[in-house]
Amino acid sequence: MSRVEVRDLTVVRGTRTVLSGVGLAVGGGDWLAVIGANGAGKSTLLKALAGVLPYSGEVLVDGTPVRALKPRERARLLAYAPQSPVLPADMTVFDYTLLGRTPYISHLGRESRRDREVTASVLERLGLSSFASRLLGHLSGGERQRVVLARALTQQAPVLLLDEPTTALDLGHQQQVLELVDRLRLADGLTVVTTLHDLSLAGQYADSMMLVAGGGAAASGVPADVLTEKLIAEHFDARVRVVTGAGGRPEVHLERPCT
Ligand code: ADP
Ligand code: MG
């Protein structure tokens, strides 16, 4: 199980400092949910962790600064599913998912039988086997989102970074995807960092949460410490009622203002 640590992370995009001096730690096998209003910097944080954006500060996996690693080595440690990836329209679901095996295939080599087996098994687990030969350009938004997750899982990295993995999914698929991620976490000891805009859903799955606002962590801790009516009013400008649900986890309900 791999521990993730971030120290003094600063990310500048364009002329704007989106994140400034952010620190966080996720224990091996734990699930951290990153929340925050639109534009707060959640995707920016995940992109920096994944190494697809330049940053200052340090991202460490089991104490190793990932900046020092070659892309192939980094990809074996951290798998990243972006929020809105650009997908090649004329590639099949199988071939795209197989790309997750790239860090294991030598530069001049071809994929092995094992790579194809891992790919087929991930597609099966995500209920995508019957889509294997379909073209990406012919999928619905929710199907594309599951394929992007499949590619990340095929990477078999100990750290899984998922940016809004459920946004385009219907209720049933939201539950299936999050349950699958949780099962993998428990079975394979994956460390999971997700952004999730559904606060109740985030509170149900995460061990810890971080609320991003103003370029940093406005709050972090167990879900009950972060999902409070006061913090949500302050940072989302929303009126909500927070109740304690199953397992003592907080549930967030939107409340209509009195007229
Ligand atoms: P979130 O995922 O929390 O909604 P993002 O991390 O995507 O927010 O964006 C954080 C901020 O960075 C936003 O203000 C956004 O406009 C800005 N931003 C995102 N991408 C770029 C970019 N390529 N160039 C400049 N600013 C950007
Ligand atoms: Mg985002």
Image (cartoon, grey):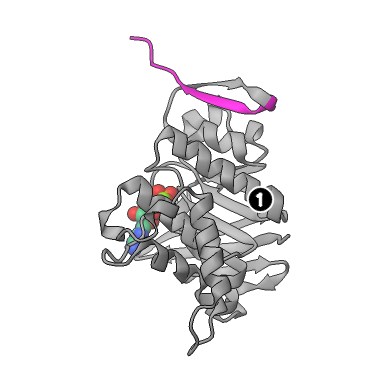
Give the side of residue 196 with respect to residue 139, left or right.
right
Camera-side residue: 3 or 106? 106
Please tell me in which quadrant of the rendered image residue 258 appears.
top left
Camera-side residue: 238 or 20? 238
Residue 114 on image: x %, y %: 58, 72
**Which amino acid type is marked by label 1?**
Arg
Give the side of residue 20 with respect to residue 159, left or right.
left
Q: Is residue 137 visible?
A: yes
Please tell me in which quadrant of the rendered image residue 95 appears.
bottom left
Give the side of residue 189 with respect to residue 130, left or right.
right
Residue drawn at (47%, 62%) of the image: 151
The C terminus lies in which quarter of the figure? top left
Q: Is residue 20 visible?
A: no
Q: Magenta includes 69?
A: no
Looking at the picture, does residue 53 appear above or below residue 150? below
Q: Which residues are magenta?
A: 247-259
The N terminus lies in which quarter of the figure? bottom right
Q: Which residue is mark 1?
A: 185
Residue 78 on image: x %, y %: 58, 65
Residue drawn at (35%, 65%) of the image: 15
Residue 174 on image: x %, y %: 47, 39
